[in-house]
Amino acid sequence: MSRFRLFDLNPAQHDAATTLEGPLLILAGAGTGKTRVITARIAVLLGHDVPPHQILAVTFTNKAANEMRDRIKGMVDDAKGLNISTFHALCLRILRVSIEKLGYKNTFAIYSEGDQLGLLKKIINRTSAQDENLEPAVAKAWISKAKNNGWRPPEDDETLVGSVYRQYQIALKQLNAVDFDDLLMLAVRVMVPARRKRAERGDKSRPGCTTRDRPKAGITQHRTRSPSPEPVASSEKCRNWLRAT
Ligand SMILES: Nc1ncnc2c1ncn2[C@@H]1O[C@H](COP(=O)(O)OP(=O)(O)OP(=O)(O)O)[C@@H](O)[C@H]1O
Ligand SMILES: [Mg+2]
């Protein structure tokens, strides 16, 4: 049972929290009640008998995830089964179950920054020509940016960074290891084919809600279309980016 009272929300918050169909984007300034809307919407969904295990709330930081968990506990009698976590924790859970589809073992290790730099140093030493100089930390930053754009390594050796990126990914896989950016990128690679299959079957998306900070106070609510299942961007995009920079 929910202890939450909808009259604790202002009209825009109320409208967002009680919209049960389709995805929503909430654009609102810092401290204007975004988390309150999300937690209220979860309480409303539970009040409509949506099973808790079908509700997922994802945040960027552990602090925000804990805050959301604590607030929901104060709003409903039974919050058991709700999935509230950070993006990285969620992706880790997905990969522990599904990474074998990508050729890794599910006992994979997560590389620390030191592990990454050590591996990159070895690869750079054996790859760079005498007149080339690439700091492992610089290579790490470039690779991280490429991964966050969903770009796989280029297939040729046109640039040193591109070549190092490709060898780094091969080495990580051989070592059955992933880095922090892989957690997100590989989870997307696992999920996109499944999502595409669901779309082909015509499955409807469940209610969704995203919040973004915007500079001015006040809450604006937009109904959004569920994003179409994009394939992970190709290695060609990474190659073009490295060429241009
Ligand atoms: N309609 C409301 N009535 C009373 N208090 C409210 C209302 N909406 C939000 N608050 C209070 O305002 C504060 C900020 O709300 P909340 O944490 O939900 O905002 P936020 O947009 O998620 O903030 P942040 O940008 O820091 O993540 C909280 O103490 C919350 O209880
Ligand atoms: Mg918040």
Image (cartoon, rainbow, N blue to C red):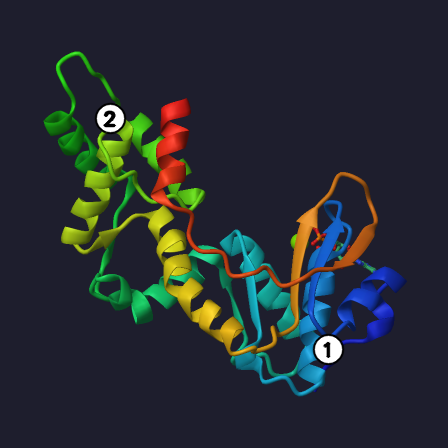
Task: Tell me, for residue 55, which label it has, or none.
Answer: none
Mark 2 is on which residue type?
Answer: Leu
Quadrant, the N terminus? bottom right
Judging depth in this view, the residue of 91 and 73 nearest the camera is 91
Q: Residue at x 43, y 63 (%)?
A: 192
Residue 12 sits in which quadrant? bottom right
Does residue 217 appear in this view? yes
Q: Residue at x 65, y 83 (%)?
A: 77
The secondary structure type at the circle numbered 1 is helix
Viewed as shown, does residue 140 lie left or right of 8? left
- Residue where numbered disc 2 is placed: 160
First in residue order: circle 1 vs circle 2: 1
Q: Dividing the image into four quarters, tell me where ligand 1 lies.
A: bottom right
The verdict on label 1 being within 8 Å of ligand 1 is no
The verdict on label 2 being within 8 Å of ligand 1 is no
Which-is-in-front pick, marks 1 and 2?
Answer: 2
Viewed as shown, does residue 216 lie left or right of 1? right
- Residue where numbered disc 1 is placed: 44
Does residue 175 appear in this view? no
